[in-house]
Amino acid sequence: MNTPDKLLTIAVTGLNAIDSPGPGIAVIRGLREGLNRPVRIIGLSYETLEPGIYIHEVVDKTYQIPYPAAGTTALLNRLQYIHGQENLQLIIPNFDAELPQFIRLAPTLKAMGIASFLPTAAQFAARDKINLFQFGQQHQLLVPRDKIINSVAELQSCEESFGYPLVVKGKFYDAVVTYTLEQAQKAFYKISAKWGLPIIVQEFITGTEINIAVLGDGNGKMISAIPMRKLYITDKGKAWSGITLQDDTLIQLARDFIAATQWKGGCELEIMRTEKNELYIMEINPRFPAWIYLTAAAGQNQPAALARMALGEEQPVYDDYEAGKIFVRYAWDHITDINEFHQISGKGEL
Amino acid sequence: MYLRKNIATSEAGFIFNPATGDSFSANPIAAEILHLLKQGNTVAQIKESLLATYEVEPLRLDRDWDDFFNQLKEANLLES
């Protein structure tokens, strides 16, 4: 267990604070403010122009790590090197695509003295888009009906089952709302060319979109839940501004989700509230969202709470927060030097 | 006819529904009515106060009152 005055070294990914941002910078902000002890942040980056690499008051030092495609061994080798340099106590990964490898490596990292606080591989797989409907049925949670299809001919049966509009989704990213068979076919070809098969065809649910940042302790207890409604979105559908909401039904849904899944770590529930006040779970993101600092601003610092739990420290359940807290994201041209760019590009660390 | 309990209003006429995140601006008289409602005054008491304070015919007040409350209802700000 760490003593509160001892320097805590935490590695964080997701430093891409761009227009479709990763959560890393917001997570770091929460850690620095909420842990009440000296914190050294080690950034783990994939690309050389992730803005967080160059913002030294946020990230003390950054190391590049291999892409998930390079395999678990390559990642472990790199983490062993970084650990040798920095003596990491905790790693907080923030990308969906990297999570399976970090989950797989968690016991090895623990043996090295590096804590993490991640869902299990089974929890990670269960909330996957492809399994979401089954997941909802299993846990009595409302999820839009869907069909997993592998050929364009199967769109006909989706049309018969759900009617239009239909949402055609890729297995990793992309979703298109379609109103005719021709549009659905076009979306099928476009998305499958980009992301491969299968394609998920989902019934369209109209309503108000709400997102909930949730933190579970891994034993069925919800530590925190903060609902947020987007006030302004980018052309990629990402929140550029949002406001915290106070609604007991949303908190109860998050509590039910955590109790049913025993979820360990942070996640984001994407909810659609219909006119009849039904709450559909549209998607479950298995990590903190990019707007996670709003949880700290509203009174429940989820990144700091996750860090405390990962380190085996006591973390009480949060029961209050401020509704009406707003975040407004902004763009800032950070200036750096060519030498810094050379260092991260050439040496893989800065 | 009551405002939902969790609705926040300000003296400047700002209305915030924390359950939905919706916010609205009310003009000074609407803000005054909301303030009186939140204090627990009845509709009759508020109407009486408005008639005493402003130069307005009772019929006109009733019409504007209904219009205002329809807007509050549409905005999901009233207890159902």
Image (cartoon, rainbow, N blue to C red):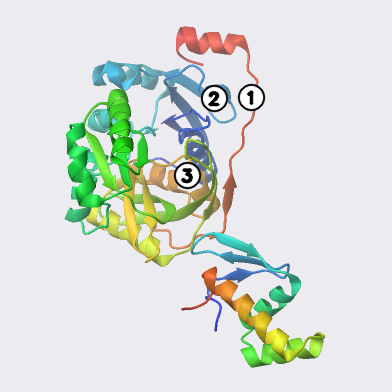
Mark 3 in CB contact with mark 2 (< 8 angstroms): no
Q: Which residue is mark 2?
A: A51
Residue at image coords 72%, 85%: B60
Q: Amino acid at mark 3?
A: Ile
Residue at image coords 51%, 70%: B76
Q: Is residue A122 at least partly visible in the picture? A: no
Q: Is residue B24 left or right of residue A211?
A: right
Please name whichever residue, A26 or B53, is drawn nearer the observer in this view of the structure.
B53
Q: Which circle's residue, 2 or 1, is located before the other in the chain?
A: 2
Mark 2 in CB contact with mark 1 (< 8 angstroms): yes
| Subunit of label 1 | A
Q: Between marks 1 and 3, how big is the CA–CA gap? A: 22 Å
Q: Which residue is mark 3?
A: A292
Do marks 2 and 1 both belong to one polypeptide chain? yes
Q: Between marks 3 and 2, how big is the CA–CA gap? A: 18 Å
Measured as percent of width and height from the top left, residue A133 is found at 22, 49
Occupied quadrant, residue A68 = top left
Question: In the picture shown, does residue B25 fall above or below B31?
Answer: above
Residue at image coords 63%, 89%: B43
